[in-house]
């Protein structure tokens, strides 16, 4: 190992693989031209990208001017972020799931291919809850392995997902108290 390599950490780019719009890393909406923009690839790691004002992303765009088709190409990341609002991918459904203490998205291999965010980002009590973006054309497959791995789907595409997950958490606690015979005061 050379002196230059000692102490250097290789920065990885989790968005380096080109994906389809259904699997996009991020999605934006720009009202000025009624455009939906899917980020399909980022050329740099997040660390390098944040220091580079000319960082580019490979995107797909669909708008009135594309006549319902996708147009593909590169765009400056900072221009897109400044001119558009980040949105949920309209080609996906969003499932909020509860997992037991021994299960996580990282453990259940089929789930690793879906974009997911822990629900504890929304509320600190939702430790075992995860919001998963499922391409609409893969919903049946997702529901099948959710059942196989005993993932409880709390809701799909709900604007009240945090409240529904918190309600589910309360119900599960009540069932646990009822099962153990504890008294509530």
Image (cartoon, rainbow, N blue to C red):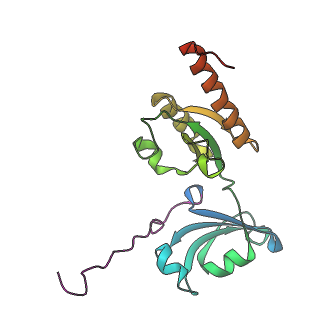
Across the whole image, how many numbered discs are drawn on residues? 0
Name the residue: 57% across, 60% down. Answer: 24
Taking 88 as reference, is 3 left or right? left
Name the residue: 54% across, 60% down. Answer: 20
Asked if residue 6 is among those painted magenta in the image, a careful observer would answer yes
Taking 110 as reference, is 76 left or right? right
Residue 58, how many percent across, how many down? 55, 74
Residue sitting nearer the eye, 106 or 18: 106
Residue 142, how many percent across, how many down? 53, 38
Q: Quadrant of residue 127?
A: top right
User: Is 173 located above or below residue 182 in the figure?
Assistant: below
For the magenta stretch, what is the residue range? 1-21
Q: Farthest residue to the right: give it.
A: 32
Residue 31, how many percent across, how many down? 81, 69
Name the residue: 58% across, 37% down. Answer: 97
Q: Quadrant of residue 69?
A: bottom right
Dominant secondary structure of the residues highlighted in magenta in the image: loop
Which quarter of the image is occupied by the C terminus?
Answer: top right
Q: Quadrant of residue 63?
A: bottom right
> Is residue 157 at least partly visible in the picture?
no
User: Is 172 located above or below residue 31 in the figure?
Assistant: above
> Is residue 67 at least partly visible in the picture?
yes
């Amino acid at each position: 190992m050379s002196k230059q390599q000692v102490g250097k950490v290789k920065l990885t780019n989790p968005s380096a693989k080109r994906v389809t719009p259904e699997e996009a890393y991020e999605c934006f909406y720009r009202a000025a031209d009624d455009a939906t923009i899917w980020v399909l690839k980022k050329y740099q790691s997040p660390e390098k990208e944040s220091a580079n004002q000319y960082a580019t992303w490979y995107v797909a765009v669909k708008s009135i001017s594309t006549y319902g088709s996708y147009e593909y190409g590169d765009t400056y990341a900072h221009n897109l972020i400044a001119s558009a609002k980040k949105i949920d991918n309209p080609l996906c459904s969003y499932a909020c799931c509860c997992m037991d203490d021994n299960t996580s998205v990282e453990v259940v291999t089929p789930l690793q291919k879906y974009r997911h965010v822990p629900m504890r980002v929304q509320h600190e009590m939702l430790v075992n809850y995860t919001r998963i973006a499922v391409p609409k054309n893969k919903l049946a497959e997702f529901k099948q392995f959710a059942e196989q791995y005993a993932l409880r789907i709390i809701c799909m595409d709900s604007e009240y997902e945090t409240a529904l997950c918190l309600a589910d958490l309360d119900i599960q606690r009540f069932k646990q108290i009822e099962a153990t015979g504890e008294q509530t005061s």
